[in-house]
Amino acid sequence: MNLVKTAMLISFMTALFMGVGYMIGGSGGMMIALVVALAMNAFSYWNSDKMVLRMHNAKEVDAKSAPEYYGMIEDLSANAGLPMPRVYIINEDQPNAFATGRNPENAAVAATTGLLNMLSPEEVAGVMAHELAHVQNRDTLIMTITATLAGAISMLGNFALFFGGRNNNSPFGFIGVLAAMIVAPFAAMIVQMAISRTREYSADKRGAEICGRPDWLASALVKIAGASGRSVNMTAERNPATAHMFIINPLNGSGADNLFSTHPDTQNRVNALMAMAEEFGGQSHETSQPPLARGKSSVTELPSAKSGRKRGSSGIPNTGGKSEKSSSTKPMPWGRGKENDR
């Protein structure tokens, strides 16, 4: 099913890119746009993860440089039955995270320093479980290709302003160029929003299953949403085509118009997760959430794991995948301490 979704996305974005080329330069412009789109699709399939990580200045870490964070990803990956992804940290005050890579064997997860510093270890686990769910659902391929092509379409629309009016090959003249400038970026944005909103709910659900605690992710979403509105991620602002990849929209003022949001309403996501927590056995003592506008959440107090549930070395409930790792030292909330490094 994910392969079909990916093929449909690539086909639509390629057709849109060709349409812009036709509006600007007629049949010749359309063929040039087709060649460029095919080349970009092939390039983005193999390299878009590296491009996005480089764009956000992500730095790769390992068990020695970030033992707690890395150990947490190890345990979550084991719970999900996934290969260990590459792990990155982004030096950014705004709390956020994303996953990228063309498949689970070539995946990477990244979290900002703001997220690691602001959230509790349990909440960080909920967020990273959500990102691993995207990897397991193969959403990362769709996200990276969408980000690459949407950015290219927007750039082509901008180029139309400078070069389209001088080209006599356009069958629609300046009106066609003007339409390319306005319609193409808007259509690309609509595709991004539709993909992002539908995939976030499924990733929330699977992420809650991976970490074993839906309320951890619910609490994290409330904190991230509140903090994102108070801080500006300048890299994301300069590269808005990547906004849909993050767990919460990183663009400043993104919550002003829900109709054109790349993400579902945060309160709806929190409500769904808290309902799921009740199904998990009443792990959270609170069942309702106040409006996000008040900046508070009834799930900020996180109870300990349910009695009798096995836990991995990072304190994350063992919900499946590989067998539980044994350790003679006291478990740390974010992973293995340096004394346990292999």
Image (spheres, rainbow, N blue to C red):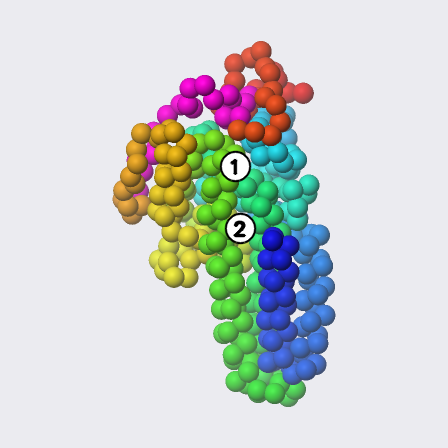
Residue 5 as seen in the image, left or right of residue 232: right
Amino acid at circle 1: Ala
Residue at image location 64% in from the left, 73% down from the top: 18
Please state which amino acid type lies under the numbered disc 2: Met
Q: Secondary structure at mark 1?
A: helix
| Residue 52 vertical position relative to residue 125 in the rendered view, above or below | below
Magenta stretch: helix, strand or loop mostly: loop
Q: Earlier in the sequence, mark 2 or mark 1?
A: 1
Element class at badge 2:
helix
Mark 2 lies on residue: 245
- Verify whether residue 101 appears in magenta: no
Q: Considering the image in quadrants, where does the C terminus appear?
A: top right
Given residues 5 and 269, the one toward you in this image is 5
Picture coordinates of residue 253, whole percent (x, y): 38, 55
Position of 298 with respect to 315 (left or right) is left
Q: CA distance from mark 2 to mark 1?
A: 15 Å
Residue 259 is labelled as: none
What residue do we see at 50% from left, 38% from top?
Answer: 207
Q: Residues within 10 Å of mark 1 (few under 14, many from 20)?
A: many
Left-right relation of 50 to 267: right
Image quadrant where residue 73 sits: top right
Q: Residue under label 1, please give it.
A: 129
Residue 119, image x, y percentages: 43, 33
Q: Nearer the viewer, mark 2 or mark 1?
A: 1
Relative image position of residue 268 (x, y in whole percent): 36, 48
Give neighbour class at mark 2: few <14, some 14-19, many 20+ (Cα, 10 Å). Answer: many
Identify the magenta region. 295-318
